[in-house]
Amino acid sequence: MNRREFLRTSAAGALATAALPTVGRADRRPNIVYVFSDQHRAVSLPGEPHNEAQAPNLARFRSENLSMERCVSNYPLCTPYRGILMSGRWPQQTGLLHNNVALGTNEYSLGRAFRDAGYRTAYVGKWHLQGGHIDFIPPGPGRQGFDDWHVWVKTNAHYRSWTFDPVTGETIRPRGWNCTLMTDQAIGVLKRQRGADTPFFLAVSWNPPHPPFNPPPRVAKRYRTGRLGTRPNVHLNAVAHPAGEEKALQSEAALQTAMAGYYGGITGVDVEFGRLLDALDATGLAEDTIVVYTSDHGEMLGSHGRMAKQVPFEESCRVPFFVRWPGRTVAGGAPQQLFATVDIYPTLCGLAGVPVPEHCVGRDHSAVMRGDSVAPSPHAFLMNQVGTLEGIEDDGLVDAIEGTGKRGKAGRRRPRRHSGHAAARQFMNEPTYRGVRTDTHTYAVAESGRWCLFDNRADPFQMNNLVGDPAQKPLMDELDKAVSAWLKSAGDAFPYAEATGKTSGFPT
């Protein structure tokens, strides 16, 4: 199917779903376009130290609008993040503790909250909330309140993923980089909203810069391997994991290739974000629309000898969060305000004037975004739960193994199933931990004991682990109380009390 046929098919499906009923309202609330890429860390934004990723559209958007400078992914992994975003609750409360777990249809999701408030709801891109299967989700509760439905599967295969006709379920396999194709669909949704009386909520979920690091040639050529600078905490780790993404740590050349591909993915996302903003201007919707750009989690890219995510380090858990609502949100950074995934659902409701559901466990930060003085949150909680091989293939990790970096082509060899936990560990950053990000520190406790404590002001690259320093014990005791209280509120069975009395031997 070519690009023209793909767009025509998508438009036909959307027109059919447009016949679904909506809730009427007398007032006119703002539209929302919530854009989130996958694995885009905040430290790889223009203006950040030791960054060479080019993203002029995002740089301008950040400088002209509100930036939540301390936005933290509570659980830096795809499905757990998406579960928190859509449910407003902790993973322990929804069961979404690992990748490829389905969000229950009994959750009062973000999509349902906005649809019930009279919004036309639309979703385009990566979903990752339907469990391990890759089947079409028909209209109904499985779509979590999103009526205009353009979900893609196998999205890590950036040039060979596919989507479905939202009404018939027919498989649609267009050609091209899926980030561009998803943007085409999102622009189609915006065009159909021009002149509508009903506000809309559009979520756009791109897969890049998530691996495999194989951006389109038009952006890949901007980066010359062998000349890219690294963060001070980057080092090789040739014995860590011999397969997949972490091959990048086996040599300087391999790391440079991964960095160039990752930066290229960011530049490609930046191009598509610019296209979305242009479409909002062209349709006359920009002045009445709240636009958010963020990401589900970051990427280690060699920092602390690691790749991927899941760990509490800044490269993994700090993400961009930019907000624009012309005439309503303020410009500039909010450097003292900790803001986390669990806060997004209630904050979007607060911005739009939609009642915040009682089940939301996060905090509404919409007043901060309007420029009001609000007491900052004292903590943002962090966690990781190491899993098993279950669901790994559908997380796209096989694609990461096979990817050659050339337009998504892949080899034919797949990891053998009998490799079991050893194969899983190649892609799952350890350890299982619980922790907290405060205004000044990052602290985490593993099952084997206290794992890490960093003073993020004095040590921004987190190279000096203070967990063994006796002078830090009073601080860690106070942080233990905060995390223990959180575990009780979330119903988390993590053995925290037993672990806090020991010092872990995990490396940093």
Image (cartoon, helix red, strand yellow):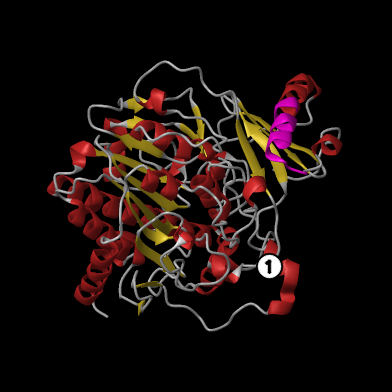
Mark 1 residue type: Leu
Left or right: 421, with 132 as reference point = right
Left or right: 387, with 106 as reference point = right
Prevailing secondary structure of the magenta residues: helix
Please say whether residue 280 is visible from this viewpoint: yes
> Residue 113 at x, y = what percent?
43, 44
Local SS, label 1? loop
Residue at image x 77%, y 19%? 474
In which quadrant is the N terminus drawn? bottom left
> Residue 313 at x, y = what percent?
60, 40
In which quadrant is the C terminus drawn? top right
> Residue 409 at x, y = what percent?
42, 77
Which stretch did the figure color magenta? 481-493
Nearest the camera: 322 or 244? 322
Nearest the camera: 21 or 472? 21
Nearest the camera: 245 or 414? 414
| Residue on which disc 1 sits | 389
Q: Quadrant of residue 123?
A: bottom left
Residue at image x 46%, y 66%? 156
Residue at image x 79%, y 30%? 468
Left or right: 421, with 41 as reference point = right
Question: Extreme bottom residue here?
Answer: 412
> Residue 162 at x, y = what percent?
39, 73
